[in-house]
Amino acid sequence: MPARILDGEAFASQIHLETASRVAALTKRGVTPRLVFIRVGEDPASRAYVSRKESRAKEVGISSTTLVLPETTSLPDLLRQIDTLNADPKVHGILIQSPLPQGLPNDQVYARVTPSKDVDGFHPVNFGKLLLGDPTGFLPCTPAGILEILRLGKIPTRGKHAVIVGRGQIVGRPLAVLLAQKSPHADCTVTLAHSSTPNLSSITRQADILVGALGRPLFLTKEHVQAGATVIDVGVNRVPDPASPRGYRLVGDVDFSSVQPVAGAITPNPGGVGPMTIALLLSNTVRAAEDASS
């Protein structure tokens, strides 16, 4: 029997309804949540991602604008732009769209956003609060979205073995911390695997929950999956496709057609983790506005 589909679009719609209700409550108090995107350069994927986020923000009542800077923008100029937004009380959330052009160090740029407006959850202060289990910080959107998929998909997590393939700072490491925390929709035993892990398939086949977050197209196949496991595909990879007008197509880290007959539940890609990342971003933005106006 094919795996149950964990529909990220449907789950995100539920969260958007809650977010819109919170926006309406703020609006009655004269507060309009405002999110500013900073995009440096004209990377086509970045343009598409920001456009999608702006569209969803508008749907739930969040005011959003995009500050587009040339690819030649220097680090001091970019930091000055961030400082201006940090000082603006009408701006509640700031998102730096990645990837940044070469020469702009991600760590310095993300750390310049004041933690109370860091709705992406990348600032060292928010990352530290995540490690400490301090709920006053903002959680990074993709890991938080994955937890929401497990919650809304009614996937048992307590005491389950979660294997995350990929140790990146944006998904792998923070997700490992979240899944290990003692909470109703986590409390897992977590293994964080990566490119240097020997006999990887012998470890992934032990997973009740398997997460692909390594950035290698279609890497995880049925040989990596225990029968009945829940499989979460985080990857966004370009592979050549002469039939596509763009010359490429986007695929995940999981070979969906191979894995679906084996897994118990699986996220599609697209339509799985991506919509949830946006949903949590907007939820964080509203929380920033709530905190600022309380």
Image (cartoon, rainbow, N blue to C red):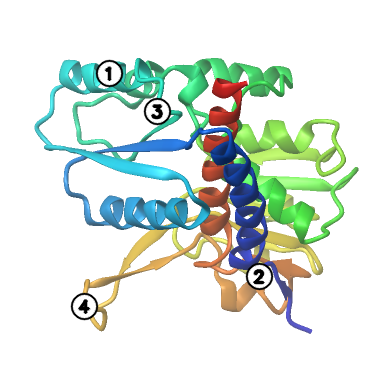
In the rendered image, the vertical position of residue 243 relative to residue 120, given as above or below = below
Residue drawn at the location 70% of the way across and 31% of the way down = 177
Q: Position of residue 251 (x, y in %)?
A: 44, 66
The mark nearer the N terminus, 4 or 2, is: 2
Numbered mark located on residue 129 in the image: none
Residue beneath disc 4:
245
Residue beneath disc 3:
91
Mark 2–mark 3 Cα distance, whole angstroms, equals 46 Å
Marks 4 & 3, CB-CB < 8 Å contact: no
For the C terminus, the quadrant is top right
Q: Position of residue 267 (x, y in %)?
A: 63, 65
Mark 4–mark 3 Cα distance, whole angstroms, equals 38 Å
- Quarter of the image holding residue 220? bottom right
Q: Nearer the viewer, residue 209 or 74?
A: 74
Marks 2 & 3, CB-CB < 8 Å contact: no
Residue drawn at the location 75% of the way across and 38% of the way down = 179
Residue 216 appears left or right of 229: left
Mark 4–mark 2 Cα distance, whole angstroms, equals 31 Å
Residue beneath disc 2:
222
Q: Position of residue 185 (x, y in %)?
A: 82, 44
SS for callout 3: loop
Q: Residues within 10 Å of mark 1 (few under 14, many from 20)?
A: few
Task: Report the residue that reaches farthest toward the right.
Answer: 159
Pair 4/3: label in front? 3
SS for callout 4: loop
The mark nearer the N terminus, 2 or 3, is: 3
The mark nearer the N terminus, 3 or 1, is: 1
Amino acid on which the number 4 mark rests in the picture: Pro
Residue beneath disc 1:
84
Q: Residues within 10 Å of mark 3 (few under 14, many from 20)?
A: many
